[in-house]
């Protein structure tokens, strides 16, 4: 299926640094979701965005739904070692129960 | 809330045998469940979408006779990999969503299938 363009593909940062990653699409979405996946586990929902322009925080995480509805970013402030993992964005066009389109993922490594 | 439980977490089977993976929504009724396959260092690839009481909709290139999906109740969907071969070895993940919560999907823990 269609893939979102997620960047960067990987990041290596020092503990305490801020992180930013983003996703762009050639088509619009009605919902943007950000997930984190640890090795050998399923993705865990971090933030859900439902309106264009919406800015939502979850602890040290902040995500925004782009005005054009074709992009979204996720920021992590003051990173800690447990932030290590793969972060995926996902776009959804329809209502509840419709399929998600996933980005390729951003592998985050945090050095203590 | 919104917990999805997947079982087993790991399974090793012999080539030619069939394996069943269960996906349960523990605290909500899942109107739709999704099955994904994930290769190492890659994103999730949607295999099929299942709605309770109806036949699953398979993505292009996914063999429906190979990957049997049953969604008999609002809390349980199963994926059966029939006549498994080593190339079927992968990480399989289910997700579930329901009306009234919003549009986000919640994922199971995944199943690591190894066919020897």
Image (tube, coloured by chain):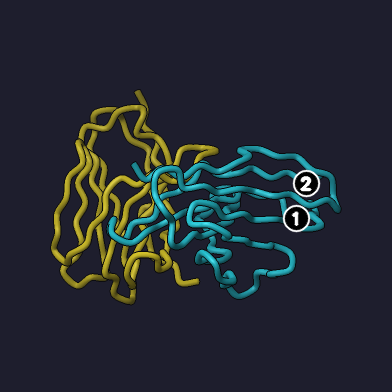
Give the percent coordinates (x, y) of residue B84.
Answer: 79, 54
Query: Mark 2 highlights which residue?
Result: B115
Question: Residue A110 lies in what quarter of the image?
Answer: top left
Q: Colour of chain A?
A: yellow
Q: Dot 2: what SS?
A: strand
Above/below status of A36 relative to B50: above
Rate crowding at label 1 as few (under 14), some (14 to 19) or many (20 or more) other CA atoms within 10 Å.
Answer: few
- Of the pair B42 and A16, the residue shown nearer to us: B42
- Left or right relative to A28: residue A55: left
Measuring 64% from the left and 56% from the top, which residue is drawn there?
A: B79
| Frontmost residue, B33 versus B58 | B33
Q: Which mark is residue A105?
A: none
List x then y, in percent, for residue B43: 50, 55
In which quadrant of the rendered image does the C terminus of chain A lie?
Answer: top left
Q: Identify the image quadrant of residue A107.
A: top left
Q: Position of residue B44 (x, y in %)?
A: 51, 56
Q: CA distance from mark 1 to mark 2?
A: 8 Å
**Does residue B22 appear to the left or right of A1 in the view shown?**
right
Question: Same subunit under labels 1 and 2?
Answer: yes
Tell me what residue is drawn at x 69 percent, y 45 percent.
B113
Q: Colour of chain B?
A: cyan
Q: Quadrant of residue A93?
A: bottom left
Q: Secondary structure at mark 1?
A: helix
Q: Residues within 10 Å of mark 2 (few under 14, many from 20)?
A: many
Q: Are marks 1 and 2 in contact (CB under 8 Å)?
A: yes
Which of the pair A86/B6 is nearer the observer?
A: B6
Q: Which residue is mark 1?
A: B87
Q: Residue at x 73, y 43 (%)?
A: B114
Image height of A7 relative to A76, above or below: below
């Amino acid at each position: 299926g269609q893939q979102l363009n997620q960047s960067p593909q990987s990041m290596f940062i020092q503990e305490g640094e801020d992180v930013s990653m983003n996703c762009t699409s050639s088509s619009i979405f009605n919902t943007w979701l950000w997930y984190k996946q640890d090795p050998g586990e399923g993705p865990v929902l971090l933030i859900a965005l439902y309106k264009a322009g919406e800015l939502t925080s979850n602890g040290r995480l902040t995500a925004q739904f782009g005005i054009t509805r074709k992009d979204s970013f996720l920021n992590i402030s003051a990173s800690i070692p447990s932030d290590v993992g793969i972060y995926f964005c996902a776009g959804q066009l329809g209502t509840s129960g419709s399929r998600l389109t996933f980005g390729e993922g951003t592998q985050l490594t945090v050095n203590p | 809330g919104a917990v999805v439980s997947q079982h087993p977490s790991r399974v090793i089977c012999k080539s030619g045998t069939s394996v069943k993976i269960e996906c349960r929504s523990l605290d909500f009724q899942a109107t739709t469940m999704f099955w994904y396959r994930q290769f190492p260092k890659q994103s999730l690839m949607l295999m099929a979408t299942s709605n309770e009481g109806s036949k699953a909709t398979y993505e292009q290139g996914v063999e429906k006779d190979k990957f049997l999906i049953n969604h008999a109740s609002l809390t349980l969907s199963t994926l059966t990999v029939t006549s498994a071969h080593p190339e079927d070895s992968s990480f399989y993940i289910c997700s579930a969503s329901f009306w009234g919560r919003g549009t986000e999907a919640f994922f199971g823990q995944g199943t690591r299938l190894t066919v020897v």
